[in-house]
Amino acid sequence: MKRRQPQQDAIGARRGTSTTTASSPSLIARCCIRALTPAAAVFVLYITVRVLTVVLKNGHPLADKITGALPPAAGASVRGGSVGTGKARHIRKELLNKGPLDLWDALLEGAQKEAVAAEASGRPLVAVEVGVHSPLHCVHAAQVGFQTHCFEPSPKSYKRMVEGKGGVNEQPPDIKARLVPHQEAAGPESGKILPFHSTGGTGDHIGEYDMWRMEKRNVPVEGESALDKKKRGEIIEVPTMRLDDFIQNDVKGGEVHILKVDTQGFEPSIFSGLTDSVRSHSIRYIIFEFWPRGMDLMADTKDMCSGHKILDMLIEAGYELYALGIESHPKAPLYGGADLKREGAKRPLDKGTEAYCRWFFDIERQYPSKEGEEYKFGYWSDFVAVAPGVTLPDKVKKM
C-alpha cells in the first residue's frame, strides 16, 4: 500500500529563491495599506476577516488550502500533510452508493500482494471483524493472505463461524492458521462482563434492549407470539475486550490494515476503547455501521444523536470519512430501490457531523409510518474512515 509522503514545508519550498522575490508580495501589500486612510485600512481588514470566516465555516474549496498552510494547533496530529484538528474537513461523497461488505472485499483484495509479502517477512497485515454473523468475510480475508481476527460473543453465531459450513474448521491448514476467532465482545474496557441479547441472528446485541420497539427492556409482553418470543431470545453474559489492548498485545510486529465494526448501536462504546489506536493512526481503514437510533438507545440519549461523536473523534484524528449507502428494515416506510437511493443522496455532508446524524431523524418525519403501524427502527448507513497518508486503492475507486 503506497502512502502519500508529507507535503514539503512551505518555507522549505522557497529555499533557493532570492530575498527580493520572496518578499515582494508583502512589500506590495505594505505599500497598498500605507496608501489607505486609517478608516479605509480598518474596513479592508474587516472585509478580509469576514471573507476568511465564511470560507472556513462553510467549507469552501479554499478552506483546506488555508488551514493546510497554518501551523497545527496544540495536540493536533500531522501525517501525510493532514492536520488532525477536524477543521474544514467534510464527509466525502465518492462512495455514497457502495455497501460495506463489497468495500471490505475490495480493500482486502487491493492489498493482496502486500499481505502475501508481509506474511513472508514475518510482519503480517491484519484484518479484524467485530460482529460476525457469517464466517464468509473473515474467511475471505484469510484466503487473501491476512492474519484475521474475528470477534463474536453470541454462542450460536460463534459456533456457526467456527464449526458451520464454510467456517474456520473447514478451511485448509494454511488458511486456518491465519484465522483467530474470539468469543468476546469488543467494548470500552477489557475483562468486564456485559449482558448480551442472544438469538444467533443478525440482530444480536449488547444489553437488555428491545431493538424493534426501541425500549430499554427485554421482557415478555402481554399477548406475545411465539415468533416474538424467539426474536426476544435470551439474555446471557459475555466477556469484553478493549480493542486498544488487543492491538497492543495481539498485533505485535504486524499492522492493522482494516477493521470492520457492526454491533447494532454499540459502536460508540467500542470506539471509546479504540482511542489510542485512532490517535496513532494504527489502523489504515475502519468500516463501521452508523445507526443513530440504535446508538441513542444504547447510550440512553434518546433523540440526541450522540453517535456523531464517533465521527468527530475520527475527523479530529485526521481520518478522512466516506459515507456509504443508506439502508433500512423491510418494514420501513422507505425501503430499498430508487426512492431510498434518491433520499440518501441528499444527506448533508458539509454541514457538520451532528447535522448529518440528525438527517436520519428527519427522514423518519418525512416518511411516517402507515396508519395502524409504528416503525421505530429508523434508518442507517456505514462509513469507511481512511487514515492520514493512506489512499483508497484503484479497486475501490473502480467499484
Image (spheres, rainbow, N blue to C red):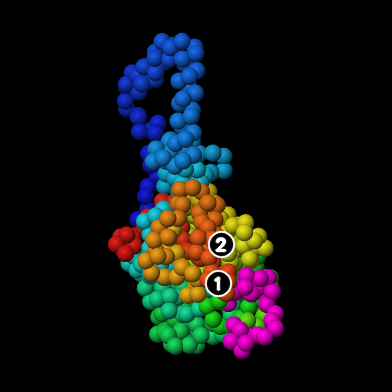
Magenta highlight range: 204-231
Residue 387 visible in image: no
Task: Tell whether position 53 is magenta.
Answer: no
Residue depicted at 61% across the width and 89% down the height: 226
Viewer-proximal residue, 5 or 44?
44
Q: In the picture shown, does residue 39 fall above or below 175?
A: above
Residue ID for mark 1? 371
Q: Label the magenta part by its dominant secondary structure.
A: loop
Q: Amino acid at mark 1?
A: Glu
Residue depicted at 62% across the width and 62% down the height: 296
Q: In the picture shown, does residue 252 fall above or below 23?
A: below
The mark that comes first in sequence, 2 or 1, is 2
Rendered-image quadrant of the C terminus: bottom left
Residue ID for mark 2? 292
SS assignment at label 2: helix
Marks 1 and 2: in contact by CB < 8 Å? no
SS assignment at label 1: loop
Residue depicted at 47% across the width and 80% down the height: 134
Find the distance from the CA under tag 2 to the CA under tag 1.
Answer: 24 Å
Viewer-proximal residue, 310 or 68?
310
Q: Amino acid at mark 2?
A: Pro
